[in-house]
């Protein structure tokens, strides 16, 4: 089985390099292809590929596994995603296209100043580097546990292999390649989920209707948490989903760089709204998969995976069942995991490189080759390699700290790092005040620190447990601090 899995991995990787070769044959070349793809990407290709880019290894693993403890209470957050996508299509995309941006954080420089631009870019780099590396970590972790550990191969070896492959196929084509490889990754992510559900239904000799009926009887499909003090209270989930989408997609260079490769604003808007509808369907599929996994375990007596303390590990439920069902489901799962890993990292490396080149090296202001003997192309390649190495370091360093379901960890990171971005953009878009540019970095650091203190002590102080809505509070505090710091400044014209 291990050799079969490695063969599938090799074939899939070869397909990615084939796509890289095909996309590099025509159209934009060099930095133009890497950063903007010549703005010629078909909107429907971007929309379909966005599914894989949004899902990642965390959704692929943690959403089905999360049904064990959270039932379907993740779904109200998905409803919030749709509202967030609408805000992106109607508010943010028109702004980005009007200003003809490559890095979306260039807006902050135009609105407030250089310190604000670099602050926004730095928070994106921090958040995306950590969040995307955690998504990639989960892929490496699962393949290591189920394949490489038995061979005595150290954890860092598959991590190095994954990052090296991603670096190679994004090195030249950048976002132009990523837009098309995302479509392949989306396909294999969905194939893995569908194949596992079908295999479980055949094994248990039941249809979808009976599966949902039994799942409802067991409480697996419980949708709305009605306790206002609970972390997953449905109204909090909806609001959190909306603002998580606005921040983690609309204010995220990785996700928006793909959208900005569309030919026109209208194409980009069609892409975003189509993606939001598809996202509902896909998440229902993964939640149904979670219910199917638990039903299979109950009906067959399959022992759910546990840690050293005897507690069930949700992130291991899907792979454990997939590997036990058949060789076909095991192979589909591995291909899905590989696709999830690649989709988590390829666009991120490209976006991190773009952000650093534009917001810190000033690629959009003047040629960096005037300040150094290196050409812009060489500078971009060096930056790309450095971020790949940082990515690898985060993956390896996180290994001892993997405890809870990673989807919670990823959103915790987002809540503290994207909050200042939310506050900055809201202040820029919905007020005419001119923030004190030199104060912005201090405000952006102070706000998440205050939120962290509040989140730790809220259960004792107020009897309230903060969930993902800490993102909203973080953005609000940033907004208010910007407001009060701007009281003695002139309004924008």
Image: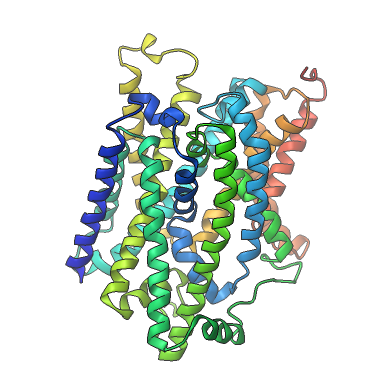
- Residue 133 in picture, x, y percent from top left: 42, 49
Residue 389 in sight from this viewpoint: yes
Residue pictured at 60% horizontal, 77% vertical: 221
User: Extreme top residue here?
Assistant: 370
Q: Is residue 152 left or right of residue 250?
A: left
The residue lying toward the viewer, choosing from 397 and 490, is 490
Residue 251 in sight from this viewpoint: no
Q: Is residue 471 positioned above or below 187 on the image?
A: above
Q: Is residue 303 positioned above or below 45 on the image?
A: below
Residue pictured at 37% horizontal, 29% vertical: 33
Residue pictured at 53% horizontal, 38% vertical: 256
- Residue 364 in picture, x, y percent from top left: 48, 18
Q: Is residue 188 positioned above or below 98 on the image?
A: below
- Residue 420 found in image quarter: top right
- Residue 176 found in image quarter: top left
Q: Is residue 277 left or right of residue 459?
A: left
The residue lying toward the viewer, choosing from 239 and 287, is 287
- Residue 13 in picture, x, y percent from top left: 25, 51
Residue pictured at 43% horizontal, 61% vertical: 402
Q: Quadrant of the N terminus?
A: bottom left
The residue lying toward the viewer, choosing from 23 and 453, is 23
Q: Is residue 30 positioned above or below 423 on the image?
A: above
- Residue 368 found in image quarter: top left
Q: Is residue 18 left or right of residue 461?
A: left
Query: What colouring style does the render use?
Result: rainbow
Q: Quadrant of the C terminus?
A: top right
Q: Is residue 161 left or right of residue 470?
A: left
User: Extreme right residue here?
Assistant: 487
- Residue 198 in picture, x, y percent from top left: 40, 77
């Amino acid at each position: 089985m291990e050799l079969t899995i490695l063969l599938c991995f090799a074939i899939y990787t070869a397909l990615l390099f084939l796509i890289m070769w095909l996309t590099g044959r025509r159209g934009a070349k060099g930095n133009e292809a890497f950063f903007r793809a010549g703005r010629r990407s078909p909107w429907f290709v971007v929309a379909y590929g966005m599914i894989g880019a949004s899902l990642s290894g965390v959704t692929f693993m943690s959403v089905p596994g999360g049904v064990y403890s959270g039932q379907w209470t993740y779904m109200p957050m998905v409803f919030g995603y749709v509202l967030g996508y609408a805000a992106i299509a109607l508010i943010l995309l028109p702004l980005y296209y009007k200003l003809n941006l490559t890095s979306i954080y260039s807006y902050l420089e135009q609105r407030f100043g250089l310190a604000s631009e670099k602050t926004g870019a730095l928070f994106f780099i921090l958040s995306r580097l950590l969040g995307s590396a955690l998504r990639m970590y989960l892929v490496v972790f699962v393949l290591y546990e189920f394949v490489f550990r038995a061979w005595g191969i150290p954890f860092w070896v598959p991590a190095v292999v994954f990052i090296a492959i991603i670096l190679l196929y994004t090195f030249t084509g950048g976002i132009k390649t990523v837009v098309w490889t995302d479509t392949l990754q989306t396909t294999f992510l969905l194939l893995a989920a569908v194949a596992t559900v079908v295999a479980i239904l055949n094994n248990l000799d039941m249809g979808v209707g009976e599966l949902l009926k039994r799942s409802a009887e067991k409480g697996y499909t419980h949708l709305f948490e009605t306790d206002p003090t609970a972390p997953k209270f449905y109204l909090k989930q909806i609001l959190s989903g909306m603002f998580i989408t606005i921040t983690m997609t609309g204010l995220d260079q990785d996700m928006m760089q793909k959208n900005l490769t569309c030919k026109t604003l209208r194409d980009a808007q069609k892409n975003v709204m189509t993606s939001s509808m598809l996202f509902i369907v896909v998440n229902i599929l993964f939640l149904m998969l979670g219910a199917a996994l638990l039903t299979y375990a109950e009906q067959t007596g399959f022992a759910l995976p546990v840690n050293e303390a005897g507690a069930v590990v949700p992130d291991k439920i899907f792979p454990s069942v997939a590997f036990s069902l058949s060789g076909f489901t095991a192979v589909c799962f591995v291909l899905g995991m590989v696709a999830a890993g690649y989709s988590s990292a390829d666009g991120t490396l490209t976006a991190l490189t773009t952000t650093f080149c534009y917001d810190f090296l000033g690629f959009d202001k003047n040629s960096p080759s005037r300040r150094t003997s290196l050409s812009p192309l060489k500078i971009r390649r060096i930056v790309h390699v450095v971020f790949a190495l940082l990515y690898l370091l985060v993956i390896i360093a996180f290994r001892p700290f993997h405890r809870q379901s990673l989807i919670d960890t990823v959103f915790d990171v987002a809540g503290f790092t994207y909050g200042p971005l939310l506050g900055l953009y809201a202040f820029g878009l919905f007020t005419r005040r001119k923030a004190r540019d030199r104060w912005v970095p201090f405000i952006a650091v102070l706000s998440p620190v205050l939120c962290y203190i509040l989140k730790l002590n809220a259960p004792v102080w107020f009897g309230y447990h903060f969930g993902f809505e800490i993102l909203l509070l973080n953005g609000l505090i940033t907004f208010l601090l910007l407001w009060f710091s701007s009281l003695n400044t002139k309004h924008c014209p």
